[in-house]
Image (cartoon, rainbow, N blue to C red):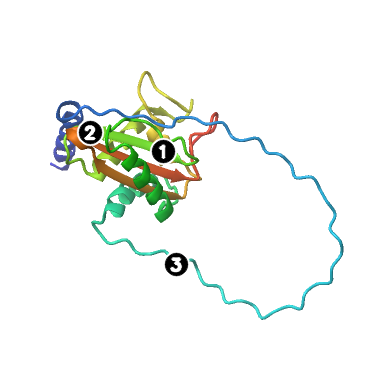
Amino acid sequence: MATGSSTTQVIFFTISLLMVAFQAVHADYYRPRPPVIPTPYVPKPWVPLPTPSPKPVYRPPYTPRLPVGSIARQFLDPHNAIRSRLGLPPLVWDGKLASYATWWANQRRYDCSMTHSTGSYGENLFWGSGSSWAPGFAVQSWVVEGSSYNYNTNSCDGSGMCGHYTQIVWRDTKRLGCASVVCENGAGVFITCNYDPPGNYVGEKPY
């Protein structure tokens, strides 16, 4: 019975993708690693050591608890669900990235164009017709690309996409910020997620 229910959910999700909306997706697939330029050694003049101060008390960094059902959690939870299945550390919600994503979503409010911001972050985009696309659906549309990703060859099988998926599961990525906007004149919904540090470096596996 559980298997039949799971199959029904998969079929419903697939039909939703194919029939309810035309979705255009683009990924910031690959980027070259910037070259590492060694810093020349410059000897420093000798200075006496400072008088030691009392040992500071360590306090772990404060991570605000996101309310269940909040927009942030609707984006973050499905990201971390797939990362958990692969044994990868969870992402944390980052206000700076969310502000950046909101800024870019507002730039696309008037045309809903699937255009990347070309910033220094990794970036996944989603577009759907209508006005009711939930964050989790957008993330799931990227996660399903995992079926096209071949880990052994570090490539997408056939003509399938997998760049959104590899960015989600990029081991070194630690922070996430996303935003959604309903575009003007019924142009649809534009969703963007930004990742820091970015992933999808040429020739490197995500994990």
- Estimate the spatial distance between the alpha carbons at disc 2 and disc 3, rounded to whole Å: 36 Å
Which residue is at a point 17% across and 41% down the rendered structure image? 132
Which amino acid type is marked by label 3?
Tyr
Q: What number is the disc on residue 128?
A: 2
Circle 1 residue: 123
Asked whether, in this view, residue 49 is left or right of residue 25, the answer is: right
Q: Give the quarter of the image for residue 94.
A: bottom left
The image shows residue 128 at horizontal and vertical percentages of 22, 33
Proximity of marks 1 and 3: CB atoms separated by less than 8 Å: no
Q: Nearer the viewer, residue 106 or 80?
A: 106
| Picture coordinates of residue 31, whole percent (x, y) | 52, 31
**C-alpha distance separating marks 2 and 1:** 17 Å
Observer able to see residue 84: no
Query: Tag 2: residue type?
Result: Gly
Q: Residue furthest bottom?
A: 54
| Element type where label 1 sits in the image | strand
Residue denoted by label 3 = 62
- Which type of secondary structure does the marked residue at label 3 adopt? loop
10 Å crowding of disc 1: few (<14), some (14-19), many (20+): many
Residue at the spot x=21%, y=37% of the render? Answer: 184
Few, some or many residues within 10 Å of mark 3 (<14, 14–19, 20+):
few
Q: Nearer the viewer, mark 1 or mark 3?
A: 1
Specify which label sits upstream in the sequence, 1 or 3. 3
Crowding at dot 2, Cα within 10 Å, few <14 / some 14-19 / many 20+, comes out as: many
27 lies above or below 71: above
State which mark lies toward you, 2 or 3: 2
Q: Quadrant of residue 65?
A: bottom left
Q: For the residues marked 1 and 3, what is the alpha-carbon distance in whole angstroms?
A: 26 Å
Residue 38 falls left or right of residue 26: right
Between discs 2 and 3, the one toward the N terminus: 3
Figure quadrant of the N terminus:
top left
Q: Which mark is residue 69?
A: none
